[in-house]
Amino acid sequence: MTPSARVQAAIDLLDLIIAAAREGGAAADTLIARWFAERRFAGSKDRRAIRDLVYAAIRRSGERPVNGRAAMVGLAREDHAVAALFDGSGYGPAPIATDEPGQAASAIPVWLVERLSPLVGAQERDALVERAPLDLRVNRLKGDRAAVLAGLEGAQSTPHAPDGVRLAENLQIEQSDVWKDGLVEVQDEGSQLLALACAAAPDMIAVDLCAGAGGKTLALAAAMANRGRLIASDTVRDRLRRLEPRAARAGATIVETRLLDDGREAAAFADIAGAADLVLIDAPCSGTGTWRRNPEARWRLTPERLQRLVSLQSRLIDIGGGLVRPGGALIYAVCSLLADEGAAQVAAFLDRNRGWRAVAPLTEVGRSDGAGILLTPGHDRTDGFFVARLIKP
Ligand SMILES: C[S@@+](CC[C@H](N)C(=O)[O-])C[C@H]1O[C@@H](n2cnc3c(N)ncnc32)[C@H](O)[C@@H]1O
């Protein structure tokens, strides 16, 4: 493909991604993979170049652009090399008219700015959409970090998490023996720190209430040295199904899965009520802390969706509280930087549940945010998380 044809291809893909974001369709990565599967003529260099153009346009557009061309014209206004490819040649895009509107650059949709935690100042907003590194967690059930570092060229320890490894770019980890043998899991350092905030230990009864495909569950199983009970639940069957082979690969034998009915979660835990040493609520949220990995998620969130999430979080934190034994810990976390989902959610829980107390979930990383702490890409070089550790009276 010619360089100009690649720009037009990126515009076509952005049209699909914008429509999907508006209508609740597939994620950008899925759409891109499908698009290339139907266009075998695009070689690997074409694919990389088109993908880079698409993501460069997405990252600089906090608001959802009207269409792919506006998104790419916005990029071209900042990048002369891209602008020069709007040349009207062959399969390339038509030249840009002097008064043609391009998408303005911004990191955050305007309606969300005032909802961010006050800790996320203007100077760190661009970091929310920068490219994220690829981190691994070394699985202590199978080995240690020194051995993994020795086997992966260019890999380094992550700054904070004791089992974290940061990979050099373009390393295909899922082809490596360390991954196939279950010695490592792909997990951002922020998620690893959140699992550490649980302070899981052998012989505990632990519940990972919103386990999804089990990223945190596997970290908890390793911290528990495969001793005790670890119940991983979720309302989505497919996610829990994906946990099973991952647990097998990691050698995490204590994981029990429990499929929940939305609205009847507590009933599924009648046997654990008031008995768990540790309950983790890694709650469904806006994902505003993970824009580095899903920058087009900014185009999907609406005030109505956010309100539904806040209500669900408030219901889940109460359900989790009911499972904890006296003196046990409830860990509430969201990969969000919005105050309503983090500090305000925990303040409301503490108001409704007198006698519970918050303790510092982590030290030496993050910043205090209400009763919990906030990790941010700008301050901590991790995905954004709010996490609080609450002790039952
Ligand atoms: C942030 S994700 C969890 C990610 C997961 N802990 C991990 O480390 O990979 C939130 C999860 O909550 C689940 N969820 C949504 N509603 C729920 C409910 N009512 N009860 C339990 N889980 C729920 C979602 O299906 C989703 O998997």
Image (tube, rainbow, N blue to C red):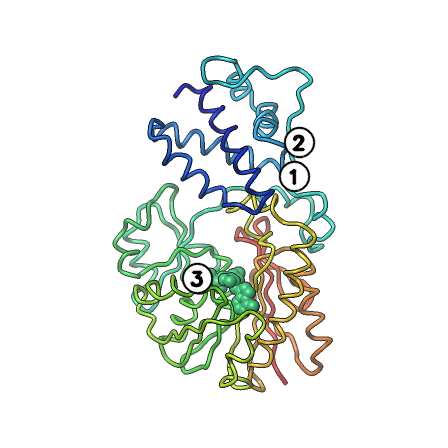
- Residue at image mark 1: 63
Residue 121 visible in rendering: yes
Disc 2 crowd rating (10 Å Cα; few below 14, some 14-19, many 20+) is some
- Residue at image mark 2: 104
Query: Up-down: is 216 above or below 54?
Result: below
Q: Quadrant of the C terminus?
A: bottom right
Marks 2,1: beta carbons within 8 A: yes
Of helix, strand and loop, which one carries label 2?
A: loop
- Residue at image mark 3: 239
Q: Earlier in the sequence, mark 3 or mark 1?
A: 1
Question: How many marks do you count on the picture?
Answer: 3
Distance of label 2 from label 1 (alpha carbons): 8 Å
Depth order, front residue of 381/248: 248
- Side (left or right) of 144 relative to 31: left
Amino acid at dot 2: Ala
Of helix, strand and loop, which one carries label 3?
A: helix
Amino acid at dot 1: Glu
Depth order, front residue of 184/31: 31
Would the CB of label 3 be found within 8 Å of ligand 1? yes
